[in-house]
Image (spheres, rainbow, N blue to C red):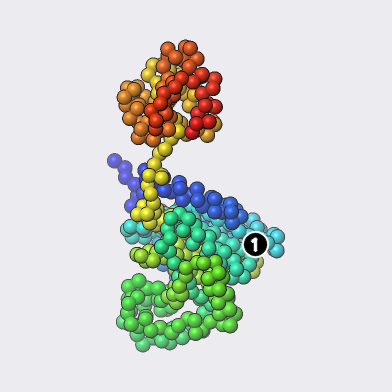
Amino acid sequence: MITKPKGTYDLMGLDAKIYTYINHEIENFMANYNYDLIRTPIFEASELYHRSVGETSDIVTKETYDFKDRGDRSMTLRPEGTAGVVRSVIENKLYGNKNDCIKLYYNGTMYRYERPQSGRNREFTQFGVEVFNSADPMIDAEVISIGYNLLNSLGIDNVTVAINSLGDKISRKNYTEALVKYLTPYINELCDDCKKRFNSNPLRILDCKIDKNNDILKNVPKISDYLSKESKERFDKLKMLLTNLDIDYEIDEKIVRGLDYYDENVWEYITTDNGITLGGGGRYNSLVENLGGPNLPAVGFALGIERIILELKNKINISNLQNNIDVYIMSVNEEEKMQSIILAQNLRLNNVITEMNSNNLSLKSQFKIADSLNAKFLVILNSEDLNKGLINVKDNATKEEMKIDESEIVDWILGNI
Ligand code: AMP
């Protein structure tokens, strides 16, 4: 037997129903917020991720799926969505109308070579939002609110938004210097990853999962003491807007995000009962320019769909997602079956959710299946009545049976479901 690759999964059953429900809600949300869908390739030139996500990030150093194509070009399966969207915005000059914000969303699979565990796969799905061409924290607040309100409307109301400001270039430079100075005497007491990060990307030491309870990390200098006046104002404005939008947030100075391109306001969506990170995002005001585009401030986030599915499984009223059909059409002989498929098509084209017997099932089995699908009406075809132009219908709730003229059956069903 050929089995699926490690860290991947087959989406099916209840998970698939929850996935469909989430996507439905995403489409509704994005229509209301007036964001446009963008779909970029699943693989891109490897260089894109080296220059955006960052040479020193865990993703690029340890987790990418890299391969040479048959033309000997270095390609990478996308580990995240932002870099591809930025590449596309630049390549397609979507910034042509410089006055407007460009508001985009994506929804697709990402690939990271991680150690698989619950909520951590090698192929996983992210829904993400990116807005270009505004540096105003009003857009940060709008973007944060999309993720927060979406989670709430899906039924995940135990979420807080942990926010932080990484500041502008100057703030980050000053803070990094202070952090390195503070950590220098202690660095040998920290984990191997921290030792590496000390030289390559000291800010990442702040969100080390191994040393997080170590007093050395608990007492690091506070980034908020190093923010420039402008960065502080942007962070204060964001807090004020989140309060006005009724968004539950808390400040967490340890949030630095794993990707190198972030600056200014950053955040994560975290469940309040079990501390699971469902997603995160932030500003990346220099990335477009670093990738060869114009100076275009930007902000975005990504939510992990698999983690949302896991959360929803504990919360959702599953019976709401079970199959509930309007009509089940029963038939036994060939003539009845012939009529059954025609009637099923007529009903389905009129938005009536319809299922029919397409096997050689006994009537008893068909009744059982109709019940398991919660059919509102049973249409019981029999040759004798069909020859008289009549169709038997049974209301599955009241058990009342009636005969309807064949030419009126669709209208009758539409009037009664
Ligand atoms: P990131 O792009 O690392 O900021 O991740 C954003 C969100 O994507 C996380 O909070 C998770 O919900 C989800 N995510 C990231 N990596 C994985 C993974 N390996 N498996 C499943 N979900 C993931």
- Foreground of the two, 361 or 90: 361
- Foreground of the two, 148 or 20: 148
Which quadrant of the picture is home to ligand 1? Answer: bottom left
Answer with the quarter of the image where residue 142 lies: bottom right
**Total marks in image:** 1
Q: Percent position (x, y) of residue 7?
A: 35, 54
Q: Is residue 412 above or below residue 123?
A: above
Q: Is residue 222 above or below residue 413?
A: below
Q: Is residue 81 above or below residue 172?
A: above
Question: Residue at position x 49%, y 33% from top?
Answer: 417
SS for tag 1? loop
Question: Residue at position x 63%, y 60% from top?
Answer: 102
Question: Residue at position x 38%, y 44% from top?
Answer: 319
Q: Is residue 76 left or right of residue 295?
A: left
Identify residue type, mark 1: Cys
Is residue 106 visible from the viewing direction of this image? yes
Q: Write down the residue under mark 1.
A: 101
Q: Percent position (x, y) of residue 412?
A: 52, 26
Q: Dot 1, crowdedness within 10 Å: few (<14), some or many (≥20)?
A: some
Answer with the quarter of the image where residue 219 lies: bottom left
- Foreground of the two, 184 or 125: 125
Q: Percent position (x, y) of residue 198?
A: 41, 79
Q: Percent position (x, y) of residue 345?
A: 51, 27
Q: Is residue 36 left or right of residue 383?
A: right
Answer with the quarter of the image where residue 140 lies: bottom right
Is residue 54 visible from the viewing direction of this image? no
Question: Residue at position x 35%, y 64% from top?
Answer: 274
> Which part of the image, by quadrant, shows the N terminus?
top left
Respond yes or no on whether mark 1 lies under 8 Å from ligand 1: no
